[in-house]
Image (spheres, helix red, strand yellow):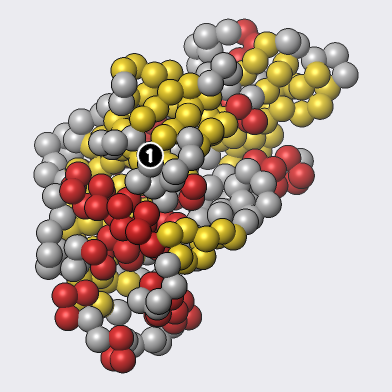
Amino acid sequence: MLIDFKNLNMNQLPAGTEFEKKVGAFLEEWFSDEKTVQVQTSGSTGTPKIFEIEKDKMIASAEMTCNFLGLKEGDTALLCLPVEYISGKMMTVRSIIRNLKLIITNPSVKPLENINEEIDFCAMTPLQIENSLDHLYWIKNIIIGGAAVSESLKHKIFDSLGSKGTQKIFETYGMSETLSHIALKQIYPVSESFFTAFENVDISTDEKGCLKIFAPHLNTEVLQTNDLVEIKNNNQFRFLGRIDNVINSGGAKIFPEQLEALVKKEIPNEAVFIGREDESLGQKLILVIEGQKSKEIIDEISKIPFEKSYHRPKEIIFTEKIPRTPNGKVNRIGLKNIL
């Protein structure tokens, strides 16, 4: 399905698949007289919620991304994310406000398998990128959101595209409350360590070191996050981990996201660190690996030079499948429940 927003006719929208019908329903909601639209959160850190977002603020967010990437009228975009969530809605809004040609394909882990034409812009999850490495050359600009991009995936992107590709790939930082992302970090062809916030986005930290965001064109209130960060300057920051994911083991605070990035440099499997209740330690550090039990993987992990002795997992568990939310994020709560 292709929608040319320069010549949009709402009465002639095709609606074959269930996903196309959902896109059509969102367009009807967008072009209605209502000043807000409903957005559902992913539920990766708690119970999913539905809340109202002002259309004017979504337009402001879309303008920031389009301007940063230099998108212009007539460029092509690919929608392959669920339109119930802010990620899919914002891809659609960017296409509307910039008069793009939007190609709509059913969200899946392999969204590019039937793509055989050059596309100017696409947003994908890390899992979708992982399963589309052989087709990334079709996309000029890619933003990756929904979860952190692992070191192993970055290496795979470079292996797939080479070191001198013309594509540009960015990792995003944002959430439903910030109307998609408020900062980008290039990971290809240049690999950056810090996110750069968009213009008119002020960043700071609270007493715990968690990021605070003030973007009045997106949200009139200061947004307090649970994300621990290191701020480099007025508009750049490094993500350390979520404070509610911090594992307290024997009095030591452990950031699982940092350990996961280290492990994923050495093994190709999905890896998640969690804390399991323990009488002596409070929480025992557990490493859960997706896939069949492998002595080779265990040996590779044993060679990793963890900075602290308590960073080394007390137990390694293999599981057939690590649970994820509908938009591809690791569901840590669901994983703890399974274990």
In the image, what residue type sits under mark 1?
Ala
- Position of residue 139 relative to residue 9, above or below, is above
**Residue 20 image position (x, y, % from top left):** 40, 79
Left or right, 334 with respect to 28, comes to right
Q: Residue at the far right: name it.
A: 279
**Considering the image in quadrants, where does the C terminus appear?**
top right
The N terminus, quarter of image: bottom left
Q: Position of residue 92 (x, y in %)?
A: 33, 65
Q: Residue at x 73, y 40 (%)?
A: 336
- Please say whether residue 293 is visible from this viewpoint: no
Residue 37 left/right relative to 62: right
Position of 1 relative to 103 (above/below): below
- Mark 1, residue position: 215
Question: Residue at point 39% right, 19% down?
Answer: 231
Q: Residue furthest bottom?
A: 11
In x, y percent, where is residue 268? 45, 37
Element carrying mark 1: loop
